[in-house]
Image (spheres, rainbow, N blue to C red):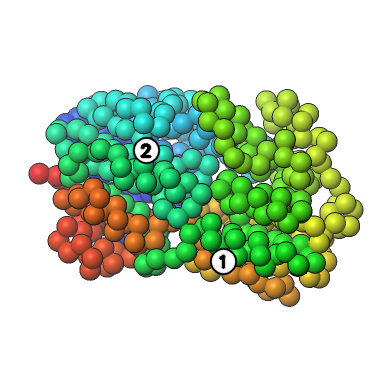
């Protein structure tokens, strides 16, 4: 089996790995690089945009962060190329892609995979494992072909709201592993606190505060939204979201329910959840296919006067461009606090850095939190000790040296485009 990391070997973002077995070729993720224009995201991979004797059989998407699927939307791919994701992922991408004015369409040839269910693409047998990460759903894959086994972690951590998923992945019998392709976004951080402990501290700090709490939170960070909902409940506050977040929460919950899973996340049934009328809400309202959900959203919509009158009782998640409506509609930051993570890269959603800069420049009490979306190095170490791969290939990282220093010759640091054949 041959491994080619087309992008992401030397940087964070834009992940794309090709696996080749005989004439079978698949891609793992097809992400957009950070800050790239749509055309810049396109990779020149044979068979991806035109018919070919050696076609790309499938693209397997690990999760719904732009850095892992964004390039899919830049230009229509060859219709014969199958795109594999879960039903929840398809919904999240579809809704997210329609948010910008020049809304994008997903490829038509989408096939679903399910947690723990093997599927076959050409000569590859692929098993998806649910991982703990900040996207709505995130998967690692065991990929078998030619008697070789590769694990691709996607993005993961062991200290978040789905910590149990990481434990289950360690316990999974994957057999002898030849190569572990692992993310290393935060490989420079050896160990940090668990999200649960961080949330408990925030809650205790918040108890006596008389002002709004703004929280940096990507639209898809369902885990952080769930934590904020819990804090809102315990401190008798409202959780303020826009139509986009409300729709995502509702869809993720409904689709999980369909599979018999009752997710503990806020939804339109949550009493203290309220929806504001910003641009994102207006945009979402134009998606006629969700009319049924909008009918249920209406009673939870609140005007800006209500928001201004109730500021001390609100928890307000903010993300890319939120500063625009905060400035225009609220402007009163007295007693308010701003919660963000010094460690988080905030790069998985375009425009988050601008928002962070704006809030940091305001006279707000800043509550730094070390909660992060990615694995501390201790988790990567744990995974390597558990799966005992012959080779460890870092991806989605700028900390290759950490891998070489830790794993010696087993660390296989590749360059973008370099081929590596498993013997
Ligand atoms: Zn991610």
Location of residue 262 in the rendering, given as x and y in whole percent from the top left corner = 57, 32
Residue 242, placed above or below residue 408: above
Q: Relative to the observer, which residue lies in front, 64 or 75?
A: 64
Residue 190 falls left or right of residue 144: right
SS at circle 2: strand
CA neighbours of label 2 inside 10 A, class few (<14), some (14 to 19), many (20+): many
Task: First in sequence, mark 2 or 1: give its number.
Answer: 2
Location of residue 82 in the rendering, given as x and y in whole percent from the top left corner = 38, 27
The residue shown at (53%, 61%) is 197
C-alpha distance separating marks 2 and 1: 28 Å
Residue 50 falls left or right of residue 272: left
Location of residue 281 in the rendering, given as x and y in whole percent from the top left corner = 74, 42
Q: Which residue is mark 2?
A: 129
Q: Quadrant of the C terminus?
A: top left
Q: Quadrant of residue 284?
A: top right
Q: Which residue is mark 1?
A: 369
Residue 105 in view, yes or no: no
CA neighbours of label 1 inside 10 A, class few (<14), some (14 to 19), many (20+): some
Q: Is the C-beta of the residue carrying label 2 under 8 Å from the nearest atom of ligand 1?
A: no
Residue 281, placed above or below residue 125: below
Q: Relative to the observer, which residue lies in front, 206 or 318?
A: 206
Location of residue 205 in the rendering, given as x and y in whole percent from the top left corner = 67, 67
The residue shown at (63%, 64%) is 202
The residue shown at (81%, 70%) is 334
């Amino acid at each position: 089996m041959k491994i080619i990391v087309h992008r992401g070997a030397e940087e964070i973002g834009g992940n794309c790995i090709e696996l080749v077995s005989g004439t079978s070729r698949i891609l793992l993720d097809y992400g957009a690089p950070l800050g790239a224009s749509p055309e810049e995201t396109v990779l020149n991979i044979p068979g991806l945009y035109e018919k070919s004797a050696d076609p790309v059989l499938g693209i397997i998407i690990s999760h719904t962060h732009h850095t892992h699927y964004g390039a899919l939307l830049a230009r229509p791919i060859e219709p014969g190329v199958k795109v594999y994701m879960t039903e929840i992922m398809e919904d999240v991408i579809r809704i997210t892609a329609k948010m910008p004015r020049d809304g994008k369409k997903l490829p038509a040839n989408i096939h679903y995979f399910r947690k723990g269910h093997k599927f076959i693409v050409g000569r590859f047998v692929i098993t998806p494992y649910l991982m703990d990460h900040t996207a709505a759903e995130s998967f690692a894959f065991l990929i078998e072909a030619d008697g070789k086994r590769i694990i691709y972690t996607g993005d993961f951590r062991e200290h978040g709201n789905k910590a149990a998923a990481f434990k289950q992945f360690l316990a999974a019998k994957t057999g002898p592993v030849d190569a572990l392709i692992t993310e290393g976004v935060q490989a420079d951080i050896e160990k940090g606190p668990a999200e649960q402990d961080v949330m408990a501290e925030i809650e205790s700090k918040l108890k006596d505060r008389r002002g709004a709490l703004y929280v940096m939170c990507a639209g898809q960070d369902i885990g952080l939204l769930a934590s904020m909902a819990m804090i809102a409940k315990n401190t008798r506050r409202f959780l303020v979201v826009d139509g986009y977040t409300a729709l995502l929460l509702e869809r993720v919950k409904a689709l999980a329910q369909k599979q018999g899973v009752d997710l503990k996340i806020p939804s339109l049934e949550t009493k203290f959840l309220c929806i504001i009328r910003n641009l994102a809400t207006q945009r979402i309202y134009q998606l006629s296919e969700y009319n049924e959900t909008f009918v249920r959203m209406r009673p939870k919509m609140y005007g800006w006067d209500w928001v201004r009158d109730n500021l001390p009782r609100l928890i307000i998640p903010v993300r890319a461009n939120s500063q625009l409506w905060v400035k225009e509609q609220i402007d009163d930051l007295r007693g308010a606090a701003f919660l963000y993570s010094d460690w988080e890269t905030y790069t998985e959603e375009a425009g988050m850095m601008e928002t962070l800069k704006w809030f940091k420049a305001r006279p707000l009490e800043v509550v730094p939190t070390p909660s992060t979306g990615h694995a501390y190095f201790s988790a990567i170490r744990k995974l390597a000790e558990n799966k005992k791969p012959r080779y460890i290939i870092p991806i989605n990282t700028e900390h290759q040296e950490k891998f070489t220093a830790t794993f010696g010759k087993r660390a296989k640091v590749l360059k973008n485009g370099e081929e590596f054949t498993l013997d």
